[in-house]
Amino acid sequence: MSRSSHITRITVWGAVVNLLLTVLKMIAGIVGCSAAMVADAVHSLSDLVSDAVVLVMVRISAKGRDEDHDFGHGKYETLATLAIAVLLFVVGVELLKSGIAKIRFVALGGVLPMPGQVALWAALLSIVAKEVLYQVTVRVGRREDSQAVIANAWHHRSDALSSVGALVGIGGAMLFGGQWTVLDPVVSCLISIVIMVVSVQMALPALRELTDASLPEKEEKQIMSLIAAVEGVESVHNLKTRRSGPNYIIDAHIVVDPNSTVLEAHRVTIEVEKALWAHYGTDTQISLHVEPAEDAE
């Protein structure tokens, strides 16, 4: 099964689970009079949107290079990661605004409705379902080196965290009653802050990639070592790197014996490419400039 097929399958499964949980939690939140559970349902609905983003963007990303995209479509996957991060942040802001409004209502003397047991059971089911979905999705994301899938997995986990918070808030309100029903929106606010922090952590690497930031220094040193280890390479310099979705783009100048023939120098570049492809995959895009030792700077 291809990389895109693995990603599509786990994302479709996630979408099905999200759809079912959205309906279940919305009904439980309304029937059980739980603001935290309704907010949790909205969060699950946002997961459906992120699933759709991943499905569309990864499909485009899998097209590879064509006459309009010489470096491939990999950054569409990065764009999906950023879109999911922004969506998560917006969800977090909306949850925070809603929670604050309810806390103010209580502070001014209002009393929130007591959450019902149906909301409590819905929260428990959501925690189990979304944590399992997170574990399976993040495993696929890491195996396929897809930041968009990993971001989507964290969207699942943020939903699980949202449900944990809802469980605490609903349980506390049911246990203590009275003004303690304010625990429901308080926990909703705490959840929203966690969601916003996670979204920023997702967005920053995606922004770096979209602005053609270099690979980490450790990775560049590894690339330099792999090139320098090839027989015939006397030194390597002017390394330039960046990512395009799951793939690396590597440019470098390699220094060879000035007495080498064109054929011999070409053989060295082929061996360098083989070494890099063996380590980073055959989709790695490599551009090498050959210099004689006496002219290298």
Image (cartoon, grey):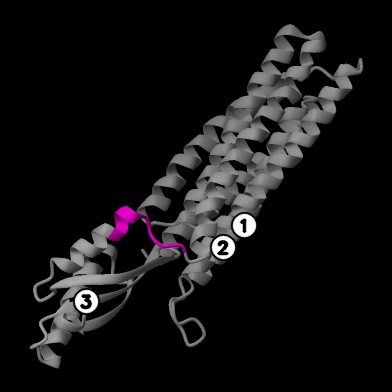
Helix, strand or loop for disc 2 = helix
Nearer-N-terminus badge (1/3): 1
Give left or right: position of 95 versus 247.
right
If the image is split into quadrants, where does the C terminus sit? Answer: bottom left
Q: Which residue is mark 1?
A: 83
If the image is split into quadrants, where does the N terminus sit? Answer: bottom left
Camera-nearest residue between 136 and 96: 96
Q: Where does residue 213 sit, x and y in percent of width and height?
A: 46, 62
Label 1 CA crowd tier, 10 Å (few <14, some 14–19, many 20+): many
Is 220 rendered above or below residue 42? below
Camera-nearest residue between 128 and 261: 261
Q: Which residues are magenta?
A: 213-220
Q: Where does residue 53 sit, x and y in percent of width and height?
A: 60, 60
The span from disc 2 to disc 3 (Cα, nearest Å) is 33 Å
Nearer-N-terminus badge (2/3): 2
The span from disc 1 to disc 3 (Cα, nearest Å) is 38 Å
* Res. 150 mark: none
Q: Which residue is mark 3?
A: 254
Helix, strand or loop for disc 1 = helix
At label 1, which amino acid type do we have? Ala
Helix, strand or loop for disc 3 = strand
Dots 2 and 1: beta carbons under 8 Å? yes
* Res. 79 mark: 2
Camera-nearest residue between 233 and 4: 233
Q: Residue at x 78, y 18 (%)?
A: 182
Q: Quadrant of residue 31?
A: top right
